[in-house]
Image (cartoon, rainbow, N blue to C red):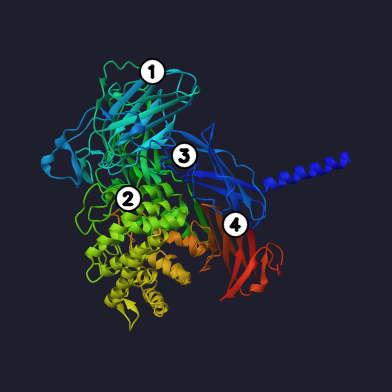
Amino acid sequence: MKACFKYVLLLLLISAQVFAQSLKVTALQCEYKPNPQGIESLAPKLSWQLQSTQQQTLQTAYRIQVTDGKAVMWDSKKVNSAASIQVAYHGKPLLPAKTYYWKVMVWDNYGQTSGWSNTANWQMGLLNAAGWKGAQWIAYDKIPDTSVITPLIHLRGPKKLGLANDVLPLVRKTFTVKAPLKKATLYICGLGHFDLSLNGKKIGDHFLDPGWTMYTKQALYVPFDVTQQLLSGKNTIGVMLGNGFYYIPRDKRYRKMTGAYGHPKLICRLVMEHTDGTVENLVSDKSWKTSPGPITFSSIYGGEDYNANLEQKDWDTNTFNDAKWQDAITVDGSPQLNAQQADPLKVMQTFTPVAQKTLISGAVVYDLGQNFSGIPQVTVQGKKGDTVRLIPAELVNEDGSANQKGSGSPYYCNYILKGNEVESWQPRFTYYGFRYVQVQTNAKVVAIKGLHTRNSAAEAGSFASSNALFNKTFNLINWAMRSNMASVMTDCPTREKLGWLEQAHLVGASLHYNYDLHGLALKCIDDMRKAQTPEGLVPEIAPEFTQFTEPFRDSPEWGSNAVIFPWYVYQWYGDQQVLAESYDMMKRYIAYLGTKAVDNILTQGLGDWYDQGPKPPGLSQQTPKGITATAMYYYDLDIATKVAFLLGKDADAKAYQKLATEVKAAYNKAFFNADIKQYGTGSQTANAMSVYMGLVDDKDKPAVIENIVKELKEHNYALTAGDIGFHYLISVLDEAGRSDVIYLMNNRSDVPGYGYQLAHGATALTESWGALPSVSNNHFMLGHLMEWFYTGLSGIRQGEGSVAFKKIEIKPQVVGDVTSASANYQSPYGVISSSWKKQGDKFVLSVSIPANTTATVYMPCKDAANITLGDKNNKNRKGFEFIGYNKGIAILGVGSGNYTFTAQ
């Protein structure tokens, strides 16, 4: 009996182990980030992913437990729910700067339990002014009131302003830490930007912290865990401050804007928690010391100068004597401080020269092989006082010299040597877009590198196909995206660096497939809320550092990002809170558009910016502005209706529905030719936008789509749609099953488009379809084809009515000479992948569907009866559900898991 009992017990233990291992909880996130700091929500949203060895796994219940390290703050107990994202904390009140620990367990549809996950944590931010414990804004000097210029002036401003530069200061504080220390967190904001060190070593790997904002309303702080860097006894904090957009010096270098919010300043609080439960605070105040630093000039637009002879050795260590430094002064700062939500900028990649050329002048131009956003790094050896001038550029002139004509000129960086030893230097508080670096110096150049800087958002997707041109196009667009992901989604990394808003929604899907942009998206939306005028206008840029003249301020295609982008963020990430927080902005903007409409038609703005026409690109040439502006107005109303219903604002929703009906009627009366089934001029943009926005009656929709195809065919599939229209052209053709047309438009290099740019040497997507050298050569506003690589060629798309890819469609399009395509996307529920290939008369499709989701697979095949799963002829359809067969496509329903289908 004892032996039998032991055997049964052993079986139970083995079963329990297998049982527990077959279902796991991973990828715990709070507010979409793993173990984040600076959380300001009093009810943070928690998310996790499931891993299971069984197919078709769905969550049926969860249990969350949160502690403060000692006491339980919240135990949800078992909650019967499939929710694994956006689960709000419902426990005891959370305290500023406090760290909380959490874990989760789940149950699935097979009756299995996961056991507890690994423990994750989050740390609260400083929730209000009291959380700063009396910390003061401090600076080296205060800008005279007469020198404050806000909003900034577009371009150089009146000559009477004259030249102006400021001191880029060093700030330091020595203090004592008593042992033993449990945890230490430093909360800091330095404007325009800061570089932080502790005991002589840089803290973190961020670049251009904090992100740029509308400083008259808000600034961002950044938390750092410095527990390991603090020493028992004496310690020294060192901060170097830069200008950024906060102060733009005036000299003969390039600047897009002229103005100043103030001189550089900082505020910080160091929280030191001891093992005995006591807490100490060190805050910025007049006792801190400051001195001019070795950076003598720094402009976000013009470059940076550094004199190594002005360095003060060990200035940020305990051994330095700061007796000659002055006391910091207290100054005013931004009225609101919030934690930085977007991922920080970082150095993400390093480039070395692939070629070089010596000019007649003796300067050397280095080719780094790729156009990217970032900074040059130089290593030199020479005499004291020798100067190295670095001139980065996207292009070169005929003689091989740096060409900045289309990117903002002159921009350069100077480094003055200490002498004798080998010295390395790179700018700290500026950046540019470049492929080439022209180096002018008498010193010996030991090495030149290019440091690619961008928002460090995690990569979320990848794509590859058998079509070499499409693979190159993917990289072309991706480099423009990378180069324009800063603390705003910039237009270009050179002459403007501004957050032009149309890109965020028009190229939004392409961006989201490639990068986890939830944090940057929230920053963009918050910038819009703060840029909205009392009248309700959302300008074309946010932050609105300068007020452009019309038509560069009030374009519905740009301002409608205030309505569209929050909705897209909800659809991609399941974040309903962003809708609630943005609803007032949406409502006020739609009301503003109503005041501009005449008989429900809008005509202001830029229209289909940079479309392809007979004239140089700029204002819309092919499509009347009334079409794009009014179509966007209707789309806003359609989204607002959905948002209002979702938020329980039924009266608003019905009012928006009614107005949308009136706008649709007015639009069709003004622009639709019922005889020929065309809108406006019959341009690609006019017809495509009308279809996409739902402005076309169902009975006319096939004819309008056919006219789109006909127009393309008659013009040998050359594109004319611009910044606004091309996204909708691609989407409408994709949804209509005409990816064959998309292929014919883009699998070529003989007319302006992606292939044309590549054929003319572009390594990042350019501002114009024709790769004009006179404009930016690193712009992502025309990057719409990226979305099709995922949704069309590879077939990964979200199911109808789904949120956060809870329901998935795998619907690959087999076109042209493409024999294989694959993509994956890291959704909130886990990795979705689709990979297909044609092998003779076989079509093989491999898919991966994450746990707690379901998918519909559209399998191209001649005969649905000949579909096999894996290496088995699955006539009983085990492992998937056969839904139907339509026009050469078998429709299959699957749950989570990995599947390989073969059709023959």
- Label ID, residue 36: 3
Q: How far apart, in angstroms, are the residues tagged by discs 3 and 2?
A: 30 Å
Quadrant of the rendered structure where residue 5 is?
A: top right
Q: Which residue is mark 4?
A: 848
Q: Which residue is mark 2?
A: 492
Residue sitting farthest toward the right: 1
Quadrant of the rendered structure where residue 391 is?
A: top left
Q: Who comes first in sequence, dot 4 or dot 3?
A: 3
Q: Which residue is mark 1?
A: 318
In this view of the protein, which residue sits in the foreground, 703 or 844?
703
Q: Who comes first in sequence, dot 1 or dot 2?
A: 1
In this view of the protein, which residue sits in the foreground, 160 or 56?
56
Quarter holding the N terminus is top right
Q: Which SS class for mark 1?
A: loop
Q: Which amino acid, mark 4?
A: Ser
Q: Which SS class for mark 3?
A: loop
Residue sitting farthest toward the bottom: 675
Q: Which amino acid, mark 2?
A: Cys
Q: How far apart, in angstroms, are the residues tagged by discs 1 and 4?
A: 55 Å
How would you rate the neighbour count of disc 3 (Cα within 10 Å): few for under 14, some for 14-19, many for 20 or more? some
Q: Is residue 533 left or right of residue 817?
A: left
Q: Is residue 81 above or below residue 211?
A: below
